[in-house]
Amino acid sequence: AAAGVAALRYDRRGAGSTPGVWEESGFTDNRRDASAALRALAAHPDIRPDAVGVVGHSEGALHAMTLAARQEVAAVVLLAGFAREGEAAFRWQAASVFGGMPAPVRLLRRPLGALGERVLARVKRTRTDVARIAGLRVNARWMREVLVHDTRDDLAAVPAAVPVLAVTGDKDVQVPPADLDEIRRLVPGGHTEIHRVPDLTHVLRRDTGRPTLRSYRRLLREPVDPELLALVATWLQARLREPSGAPAEERRTTRS
């Protein structure tokens, strides 16, 4: 807001005052919600519909890619998004997270890996929205839809005139930082800017130590990295500014 960019943010289904049950919401449901938010923002009387962008983090980045490929947006910011099929991303994540486990756990690589393969196969065989797998209640529909979703198709379909900012931390253990190069290669138009930020984790906070999921609780007590916020705000401000000679109106963006 301080940079003149307003943001529309919303709770997922079943969170806050939003109706629904998050455990029963599929990946495509979340995408439709993001699309509805984008349309609602563009239709707002105070909004310039030609200056609406989308910012997505983690799963939100995947939806931002789809929105860019399928709808009219003026700019796209991808925070910790991957450029591959969902199952490949999950396998990379599993190996990355496992590498940060304590040594006694890493000694169990083979049996735990075999268990992971059985769980994955079980998820693929499910047909219900929610399933109980290995004693845990799992959003099976969401998992099935993500596993087959290939973000490369959407990245290649982004209109050539739409600028893209992609940022991933070099200490992200959930998304491959190297996919930034693939994002830049796939998006047409040559307007893609990528940043691999030193010490930045998946939760958009910096950590100088060894990155692990166990550090998230501590990191989430801190604010989002201020340099990242400044980068995104400055980048959006430049891409969503008013055309020369147009009335001064706030630039707007929706965050997924």
Image (tube, rainbow, N blue to C red):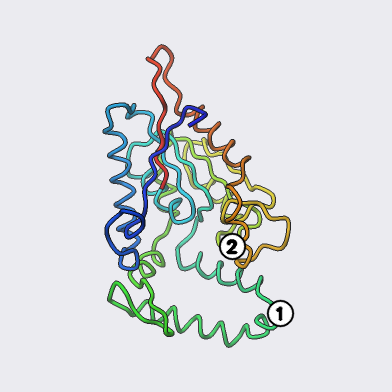
Helix, strand or loop at label 1? It is helix
Left or right: 242 with respect to 166? Answer: left
Callout 2: SS = helix
Question: What crowding class fits label 2: few (fewer than 14 Cα within 10 Å), some (14-19), or many (20 or more)?
Answer: few
Residue 103, which numbered label?
A: 1
Tell me the quarter of the picture where residue 29 sits: bottom left
| Residue 84 vs residue 6, the one in the foreground | 6
* 212 shown above or below 47: below
Residue at coordinates 44% horizontally, 78% vertically from top-left? 120
Mark 2 or 1: in front is 2
Residue under numbered circle 2:
217
User: Could you tell me residue 191's position as x and y percent?
Assistant: 51, 35
Residue at the limit of the structure toward the right, as seen here: 209
On residue 227, the disc is: none
Query: Residue 118, percent across and down?
Result: 46, 84
Name the residue nearer the viewer: 79 or 23.
23
Say which of 59 and 183 sits in front: 59
Front residue (pair 167, 19): 19
Q: Residue furthest top?
A: 245
Rounded to the nearest whole Å, what is the CA distance between mark 2 and mark 1? Answer: 21 Å
Pinpoint residue 31: horizontal percent, then vertical percent: 33, 53
Disc with the residue nearer the chain's start (2 vs 1): 1
Residue 133 point in image, percent of width and height: 40, 82
Q: Residue at x 38, y 77 (%)?
A: 137
